[in-house]
Image (spheres, rainbow, N blue to C red):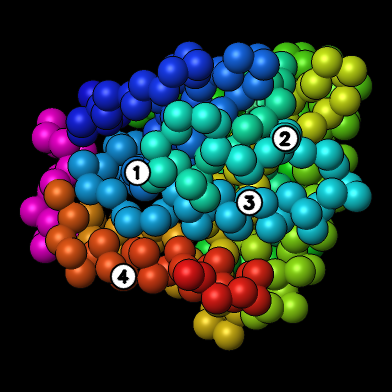
Amino acid sequence: MPGFVEKPEPVQVPGLVHLHTGKVRDLYRDEDGNLVMVASDRISAADWVLPTEIPEKGRILTQLSLWWFEQLADLVPNHVISTDLPAGAPADWEGRTLVCKSLDMVPVECVARGYLTGSGLKEYVQSRTVCGLALPEGLVDGSELPAPIFTPAAKAEVGDHDENVSYEEVARTTGAETAALLRQTTLAVYGRARDIARERGIILADTKFEFGFDKDGTLVAADEVLTPDSSRFWPADQWQPGRTQPSFDKQYVRDWLASPASGWDSKGELPPPVLPQEVVAQTRAKYVEAYERLTGQTWS
Ligand SMILES: Nc1ncnc2c1ncn2[C@@H]1O[C@H](COP(=O)(O)OP(=O)(O)O)[C@@H](O)[C@H]1O
Ligand SMILES: [Mg+2]
């Protein structure tokens, strides 16, 4: 049964109530009722949270999300209240911790795709649709779609695949008005981010947003946005439809896990092995490169 190879014990901080240990983030509630989100260096692949951490990954994801939230601020408000460390928090939380508005989360992973790959490709090959949306014939792995599409998914528990659902299914879950707002916001934000990434030589193939409603009933962007964990970023100069694209994310780890070198069978009973230092270093370098190319800032 996939999940955590070793589930970490939550760090206890006076004044913070530990709520949840996610695949990557630890969630707490502070005394003001706000959410404290701490991005760890954990990495998940093949439905497992691996036993090896990628140094600084949580910090890179947090800083990249913050940068994107700013680029998108005129399109959608975000949940960030402060980047100040809560009193008594360990020094290691610096740079990876966000104090956020606690939202009423919409139980839909809001995915936008501008290119065909992954679970979208799988469905396309079977039915020429993605999330029930009809697409033209002749598309291959990595093809650009005629226009970006909203392909929502139902959020799975740790260790399970998210499941693509139709727009009608979302409308049944959230109501028609919210579904329309989710689709419109997801596509607007994807369009902006795709254009920014394109200027920097990066194709934003697809990305996942999570939204929630605040006390006033406003739709707010939550969680992380436009990181290599929530998106597929492809170097534009190597884009070549018809094959798997090189990418700035966990592809390196996934490829290693699938290779004979790991000695691991993803369909077997055993948890994935510890990552060799080389794989850790290469993976970290990919995250740093994504950060630097997108933001134009040096990672330090
Ligand atoms: N502002 C928010 N209010 C409430 N929940 C949130 C907010 N932002 C993010 N979350 C939730 O916090 C969790 C983040 O932890 P993460 O490790 O990414 O979890 P997951 O294993 O679900 O991907 C997710 O369940 C996400 O839906
Ligand atoms: Mg997550």
Would you call the spot at circle 1 few (<14 residues within 10 Å), some (14-19), or many (20 or more)?
Answer: many
- Which one is nearer the viewer's eye here, 144 or 24? 24
Q: Residue at x 63, y 51 (%)?
A: 65
Question: Mark 3 or mark 2: which comes first in sequence?
Answer: 3
Would you call the spot at circle 2 few (<14 residues within 10 Å), some (14-19), or many (20 or more)?
Answer: some
> For mark 3, what is the residue?
65
Tell me the distance, in whole angstroms, between the alpha carbons under discs 1 and 4. 15 Å
Label 2's element? strand
Q: Residue at x 88, y 30 (%)?
A: 180
Judged left or right of residue 1, residue 283 is right
Rendered position, 193 above or below 90: below
Which residues are drawn in magenta? Answer: 259-273
Asked whether mark 1 lies closer than 8 Å to ligand 1, one says: yes
Residue 285 percent across, percent down from the top left:
38, 71
Tell me the distance, in whole angstroms, between the alpha carbons under discs 1 and 2. 24 Å
The mark found on residue 42 in the picture is 1
Residue type at mark 3: give it: Ser
Tell me the distance, in whole angstroms, between the alpha carbons under discs 4 and 2. 33 Å
Residue type at mark 4: give it: Gln
Question: Mark 4 or mark 2: which comes first in sequence?
Answer: 2
Rendered position, 282 above or below 99: below
The mark found on residue 2 in the picture is none
The mark found on residue 282 in the picture is 4
Tell me the distance, in whole angstroms, between the alpha carbons under discs 3 and 2. 13 Å
> For mark 2, what is the residue?
81
